[in-house]
Amino acid sequence: MLPMVRSHQQYQSFVEQQLRIHYGNGSLLFVAKDWSLVKKFWITDLSCTFRLLEGAFSCRGPRSIDPADLLRSYLLMLQVGEPSITEWVNQLHRCPLYAILSGFEYGKTPGVGTFYHFFKRLWSHTSANLSPKLRLNRKKVKGGKKGEKAPTKAYSKIANLMAQLQKRSATKPQPFDRLLVLFQQQFLTVSATLGLLGDTNALSIAGDGMPLQTATQVRSRRLCNCRELGIKPCRCYRIYSQPDCDMGWDSYRNRYFFGYHLYTFVAADSPYDLPLYPRLQRASRHDATSWVVSAREFVERFREYTWDKAILDAAHDALPIYQYLLSRKVKPFIDLNLRSTGSKGVRKDDITFSPTGVPFCKKGLEMKDRGYDYTRGRRKYYCPLVVKGVVTCDTPCSDSPYGRCVHTYTKHNPRLFPPVARNSNEWNDVYKRRTTCERSNKRAKEDFLLEAAKHRSTMMWTVRIYGIAMCQHMDAWYQESNLDLSSILLSA
């Protein structure tokens, strides 16, 4: 049967009543961490959860538990740093506060199977993994240098991937769509209303990936006898317990890892580094490839937001990415990858350009920037030895009293000649917000113990990632709220 759904006001009344029963002596006030949890869930409205998941419920069978309570309980589990569902069920039996904040009466809390049944409602795929467990053994990716970005994928590969994605429908159903709808409707919308995402009509979005290690080594079972026959290496079919995972290279820690590549879009203008769109990829995927997939899906699934600036690191320094962004009227702020092809500078006629796209005069001096003409899509440079309208060069390369001028057109090479010149004040002011991705990733990995879970399926890892993203938004609301709950909940 369908669950009995209550409003957020009814949930607040339930919490107030239960806290008076179990903590009427005011003992809760002496534990600051517990009191912050009460406030976070008091201001978080999850009453629309059933309406957004109604298609996953049946009218037959026993009455279901309100999915808002199960989602609330799972978010509380993440907030307290418990990685195990089984241990969390035990804590609900031991601690009245956790049961009350979840929306359950103390002593009447759900079991482990109820939570996992709820997680399956959030996942629209028939299997908990996207790939079959029986597949060929894959080669390990090639490592790089410690602390250096890997060379950007060949431009032709990025362009081919974009062309393939353009032919497909970006609105193709994804297994995590229900989770994404919950995240959009009950968290992103609230944060946007509070102004915590910046200007949604001109969003600045930073993107970056990070390794998500799920095991210390590849978990597979051999089906052949190649080892006994002395055949090495073996490329036969194997059964993998985590078929969507593979080996990747962590350049920061200078080691291989087995797991996923988590790529996240973050609101760069957010004072709390709030995530917009987390996306799991294979560990072997390059940042540029992950960005192409995520950007295509983001544009189609977040039509209510207008993308204005893309802030990316040197791993995304690929010409097709610039062309795609400019075609959508998005300003690219991408650092140059000096290990990529085409980073040694170019020549045009008798003018030489630096790797950052600044022309040199014949004396080897960088020419001065005169500004960008958006109507013509070009930037103007003039002689560096012109002082107050007078050419001071002893060997001028132009008869003009103004000195020689050079125009660079974005359409000719958007990578070297972006609309906003590199190393300009505007560029530096915008690009310094790229670190918002690293702070957001740090919160997920260290504050919410992302890798502490022992999940084996893509379904559970996706649920955990979106749950952590929801908790990051809840923490931001808590920091913005000035509500005094002590006088409301625990008054005599």
Image (cartoon, rainbow, N blue to C red):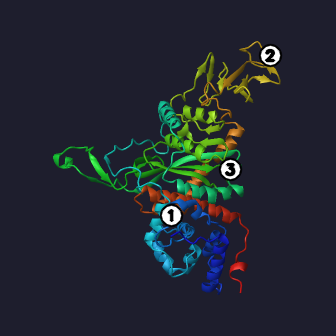
Q: Nearer the viewer, mark 1 or mark 3?
A: 1
- Residue 66 location (% of width, % of height): 55, 70
Q: CA distance from mark 3 to mark 2?
A: 44 Å
According to the picture, the residue beneath numbered tag 3 turns out to be 269
- Residue 81 location (% of width, % of height): 52, 68
Q: Earlier in the sequence, mark 1 or mark 3?
A: 1
The residue furthest front is 60
According to the picture, the residue beneath numbered tag 2 turns out to be 401
Q: Which mark is residue 27?
A: none
Residue at 65% across, 38% down: 330
Residue at 73% across, 30% down: 374
According to the picture, the residue beneath numbered tag 1 turns out to be 57
Circle 2: element type: loop
Q: Quick check: marks 3 and 2 in contact, CB under 8 Å?
A: no
* Number of residues whose C-alpha sits closer than 10 Å to that of mark 2, classed few (under 14), some (14–19) or many (20 or more): few
* Number of residues whose C-alpha sits closer than 10 Å to that of mark 1, classed few (under 14), some (14–19) or many (20 or more): few
Q: CA distance from mark 1 to mark 3?
A: 38 Å
